[in-house]
Amino acid sequence: MQLAIPHAPRGVRLAQVPGAVARLVRGVVLGLAIIAVLGLGASYVGRYFVEEQRFTSRAELVDAVVGASHAPPPSQHEDAEGTLDVLYTFAGEDHSVSGVRTAAAHAAGLGHGARVQLLVDPSQPGRPREATHARARAARVGLLPWGLGLGALVALGGFAWEVRRLWRREVVPLRLGALVWLTPDEGYLPEGKGEAVFPAHFFRQDVKHAVRARCRPQRAPVRNGGKVLAAVVPSEPGWCRVIDEELARTLGWVR
């Protein structure tokens, strides 16, 4: 095999690196799946958010009397809910409603005859909400669209990070890195599937440089006796990328 390697910077594209495009496609598919899930979540949350906002804008504040309160044991109050049975008058009509949700700690502190405030939608006067609990819930719901937007940005950022990582890890060493003949410290390359890392060294101007090298054992490297061709990662000179025969042919480095 005769090598014809151009001087740096060498014309290398991400699409020429075996497996890189497949990894990028997997990243795209994963990113699209995440965005699709977020989109469905946004659709559901959007409807829920609009309904909550409509209720808050229409509801009227009404005084009520507690008939009975129901709460879990004190050890379970954190983030739990209790319920109230309430009596109130709205639009000249008396209402008696059970199961009005509120914070468990709040329910535990209300006894028979205690007074509370309710939010009542005029279109559904028989379905009140305890005012403090409803307002706290509406505030939390208001944060959900921001959370979904942040999730979409994280998905896009993750895709951009993966593209940058692949470029720096796979392409930059081939474009700009110094090409060296690398000697594995153990005298042979590792075996197995996927990517492997092994200790190695090379000599430059009679100076020995110890490095860590990456290779794919299932691909035949470009060899020179017991040495293999590798590209030094410019930003991390203690790392090398082994160049296999398939890649060298794809890049036109073999005559």
Image (cartoon, rainbow, N blue to C red):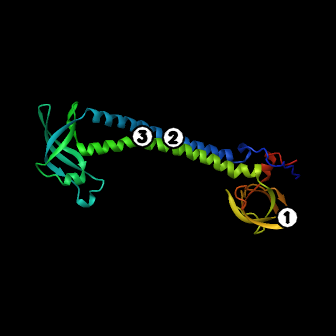
Q: Residue at x 73, y 60 (%)?
A: 237
Query: Is residue 48 left or right of 246 when viewed as pictured?
Result: left
Q: Going from the N terminus, do you reach mark 3 or mark 1 first?
A: 3
Question: Nearer the observer, disc 2 or disc 3?
Answer: 3
Question: Does residue 57 appear anywhere in the picture?
Answer: yes
| Residue count near mark 1 (Cα–Cα under 10 Å), binned few <14, some 14–19, many ≥20 | few
Crowd rating for badge 3 (residues with CA inside 10 Å; few <14, some 14–19, many 20+)? some
Task: Please tell me whether mark 3 or mark 1 is closer to you in this view.
Answer: 1
> Looking at the picture, how far across and down is residue 232, in whole percent?
75, 57
SS assignment at label 2: helix
The residue tagged 1 is: 205
Location of residue 147 by image quarter: top left
Q: CA distance from mark 2 to mark 3?
A: 14 Å
- Counting residues from the N terminus, which is met first, the one under dot 2 or under dot 3? 2
Instruction: Give above or below for 213 relative to 169.
Output: below
83 lies left or right of 193: left
What is the count of numbered marks?
Answer: 3
Residue type for callout 3: Pro
Residue under numbered circle 2: 35
Which is nearer the N-term, disc 2 or disc 1? 2
Instruction: Assign a secondary structure to mark 3.
Output: helix
* Residue at the spot 26% in from the left edge and 61% down from the top edge: 75
Residue shown at 28%/53% (left/top)? Answer: 80
Please state which of the two labelled residues, at mark 2 or mark 1, is closer to the viewer: 1
